[in-house]
Amino acid sequence: MKKKERNKVEAIRRSIEWFVDNSTVGDDGGIKIKATVPYYVANELLNNYLPDDISIPERTRKKAIFLAVRRWMRYKKYREHPDPVVALQQAYNTELKILKRKCTTYTILMFLNVDSTSIEDFNNISIIGDSLRFRNWNELTDLDTEKTWKEVRFYDRSNPILWDIGEDILFPDTSKFSSITIEVNTFGPEAAIEIASDRVDILRSFFNMPGTLGSFTYFRSQPKTLSNILPSPIYAIFGKSGQLVNVYYTIEKYDYKKKKIPAQRKDSINYLLSLFATEPQSSSTLNHLLNVIRQYQKALDISLPQTAYLAMWQVLENGISLGDTINDNQQIEARVSVLVELEPLFKDVLHLLTQHRNDLVHSGVFPEHGDNIFFILKIITDAMIRSLIRLAHPFPETAELREYLRFASLGDKDISRKKQVIEKIIESRQ
């Protein structure tokens, strides 16, 4: 076992020991745990270091670990296992099996600030295997929306989804928002919201990107998001019979205005939808691109310049890394130069961008008016994303794209020499 893995196992062991020392099991099997700061530290260590299953949504995984700790403490066969780390993993696997048996279908209702007349070509959408459907407001009779509005009014009367028509009367703002639903079969409402929010974020990125890639706008002196189509103000979850299960709220406050999808962008949107109608293979360039697009949309949703700059930098770095560890700025600049055909002036500014990133991360220093530097970074990141979209077809596997980046950075003589060597190797093996 490598040192890094040994350290993780020891961290799990110490977390278990903390739970043993700071918890009691009642006669009825109830668990009492001291909710002090170390409790949250131990929880985080378990959440991050127990072997992961990428098919399990994060919230479900945390719930399973929470239940596994209690199972481990409650039942003798786990407590007396010679290796508590193995015993906790067994308890965790048991909880996952129980959760999987309880899987059910949920309908998640969301709302986008998009003009309904401009999305008529997108009635039924498939995103990585899940179907999303725009619905007219009068088609929501199968869902208990009346209880939904009561819940929203009680929890947050100023929520953007509500329209104050005076005399203390609040109704959903049907003029500003279009409704969209997705059905998912999953572990519970916390997993359903995670899946639904991910799919609608991908859809928003497809709506936003054609008009955002390559755009250069000055407004960072008065920060605002670059997204036109913003996150849903609420996510309402319904059970099989249409009963309301829960309502989740977008914490960030956005200035929602109704936006149209321009007709000239619909071909680009349909192309992106066609690329990601089904879930791409984990080793594919499309899967890598999808993760970059997810990050890009999150960066577009941030209004604070410093945070937006770091988020956009992460998009650029993730896009060019292809899963590799990039240790220095020269590697970043070299890969950007290969993926993006930069004019000499833009090559010169790459080093400045990395310096601003380092100053911000290590010293908290960022230009007072960061409009220019943010948008220069964004323009280069946009070009990188376009390049990945273009290269996904000729290099469908990330391993192939990685080799392309390696060879494309070489001069003509070096490539010619490597070609001759490879041809001789192939010839000798035939």
Image: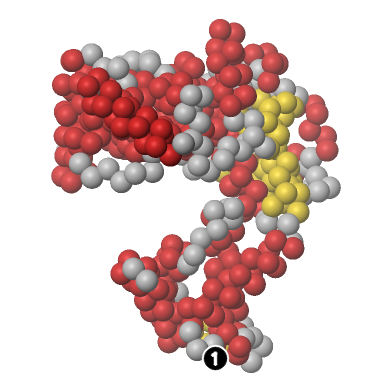
Q: Quadrant of residue 182?
A: top right
Say how the picture is coloured. secondary structure
The residue labelled by disc 1 is 80
Neighbourhood count class around disc 1 (C-alpha, 10 Å): few under 14, some 14–19, many 20 upward: few
Identify which amino acid the numbered label 1 is placed on.
Glu
Point out residue 398 in the picture as x, y percentages from the top left corner: 45, 37
Which residue occupies 61% across, 45% down? 195
The number of numbered badges drawn on the structure is 1
- Image quarter in which the N terminus is found: bottom left
Does 415 sit above or below residue 239?
A: above
Does 120 sit above or below residue 405?
A: above
Does 170 sit above or below residue 260?
A: below
Inspect this view and state whether residue 116 appears. Answer: no
**In the rendered view, does 147 fall on the left or right side of 67?**
right
Which residue occupies 80% across, 26% down? 138
**In the rendered view, does 53 fall on the left or right side of 374?**
right
